[in-house]
Image (cartoon, coloured by chain):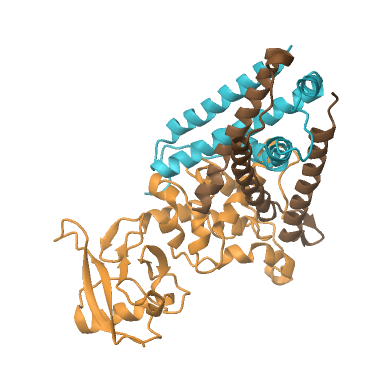
Amino acid sequence: MRYVLREFSAVPIAIWMLWFLVEISRLHDGPNGYHAHMSWAFVAFSLVCLAFALWHTWTFLGFSGLIMRIPLGEGFVPARVVRGGAYALFVLVTLLIGVLIAWGGTR
Amino acid sequence: MGRHPLRPLGPDRVNALLWATFAQCAVITALIVPAHILVQGVLAPLGIVPAFDQHYGSFAAALGNPLVKIYLIVLFATVFYTFGHRVRYLGTDLVHGYKPVFGAIGYGLAAIGIVAAVYVILTLP
Amino acid sequence: MAPSTIQLSVTRYDPAQDAAPRQQTYEIPYKDDLVVLDALNWIKTHLDGSVSYRWSCRMGICGSCGMNVNGTPRLGCSVFLRDYLPGPVVVEPLPNFPVIRDLVIDMTSFMEKLSSVKPWVISNGQEPALAAGEHRQTPAQVEQYRQFSMCINCMLCYAACPVIAIEPHFVGPAAIALARRYDLDSRDHAGQERLRTVTGSDAIWDCSFVGECSAVCPKGVDPAKAIQQTKFESTLGMLLPWGGVSK
């Protein structure tokens, strides 16, 4: 079941990105034709997709400690350190991208 | 039955490349997509933060930047490829076979999505 | 209050007489410390001497008594009846293998796959002479492959793997884990030779990382980890001239 959920998470992520692509295509309609989604239904849909996206992030970045052997002296960097580093990178990237998306644009 | 007698020994570079591409795309998806969904899909519609796609002016200005176009094309390509690769394996496991069929479906849909994304983004006014 | 008896539903199949496998129910005296293997031995001794199954050490080391217990591949000697109360406990042969008789499976395919990865130390002929002393390894060198060396060839991972059910030629979890064990051993010099088997068709690329192999492994080998590590490092080696991770 965990495997199916993990693999299936790619579907809602792709569907949300399709929505994003549709939104980009609406720029062709010009300033009068363009509108962003604001409805509660859209927020609910995004929350579901966000849950799957975070599940993908949690599981896939969690594999980094399992799969990557980074040499350190005679041994290797402990798996939990590699994993922790991956999650820390995720938090950093989320903050950076989030700030750029929210406040990086000009009106 | 042991190893298939007619299947060649490795390295299987095609599957290695398919997997390596998936691994990189899945990492990029994992790192970047949640931020987009969180801000554009939840926080901005709720009015908690602004977002570049909330207004035509800011969105068009952002998409006018070549770097943003490249970033978005790469983002769409990685997400759609991850989707296609997972459809191939998940479909095969759930239906117990037909790997070439699910491969064609998965990678085919991914290719369509990527081409569509490139077309939409590069033909913007 | 513990019951006085418990039922076992055991697969019976004699290809010389039966058209298809069938389940036969036996009722045996119950005690809290009985394992499935004890129950089968009691059945064979007191009820039905024709029941056939493999077993040897009774202590989870030999890997002989692999069987499906209530739908999960387990070692018969390591599964307590008390965990399946009130019963019946359904005991079947390991899936993904042809059945010779009752709970005895044909392991020919597994032996072929295992030998295809050459699971032994292969020398490069350049070791010091015997007179120079034993071939030494540091604890760190042993630790690199120790986990994958714990495999007892019980085949539970093959029984649990959904890919084997779809693609019977898949080399499989234990073989790939053992290939990795020897690949990581500092005394071994056949890494490239084994890679041709594990990176070819019917090998690591068939694995979709379901993880059931690691879930059922009674020795904590984590063959799923071995397969994913092999994918990662073999890909680095294939695609990057400087790629690959040294021992």
Lateral position of residue C72 relative to residue C136, left or right? left
Give the camera-side residue of B80 and C234.
B80
Say if C170 sits above or below B71 in the image. below
| Whether residue B12 is visible | no
Q: Vertically, is C116 above or below B72?
A: below
User: Which residue occupies 65% across, 16% down?
Assistant: B119
- In the rendered structure, the answer to whether residue B94 lies left or right of residue B84 reads left
User: Which chain is assigned brown?
Assistant: A
Q: Name the image quarter holding residue C103.
A: bottom left
Q: Residue at x 50, y 40 (%)?
A: B89
Chain C palette colour? orange
Q: Is residue A103 above or below residue C14?
A: above
Which residue is pictured at 37% across the width and 62% down the height?
C71
Q: Nearer the viewer, residue C99 or B119?
A: B119
The mark total stands at 0
Q: Quadrant of residue C110?
A: bottom left
Residue C245 horizontal/vertical position (percent): 72, 49
Q: Colour of chain B?
A: cyan
Q: Position of residue A17 (x, y in %)?
A: 63, 31
Give the quarter of the figure containing the C terminus of chain B.
top right
Q: Residue at x 82, y 60 (%)?
A: A73
Relative to C39, B80 lies left or right: right
Residue C206 as seen in the image, left or right of residue C86: right
Q: Position of residue C226 (x, y in %)?
A: 59, 55
* Residue B69 shows in this picture: yes
Instruction: Give the quadrant of residue A37.
Output: top right
Q: Position of residue C133 (x, y in %)?
A: 72, 72
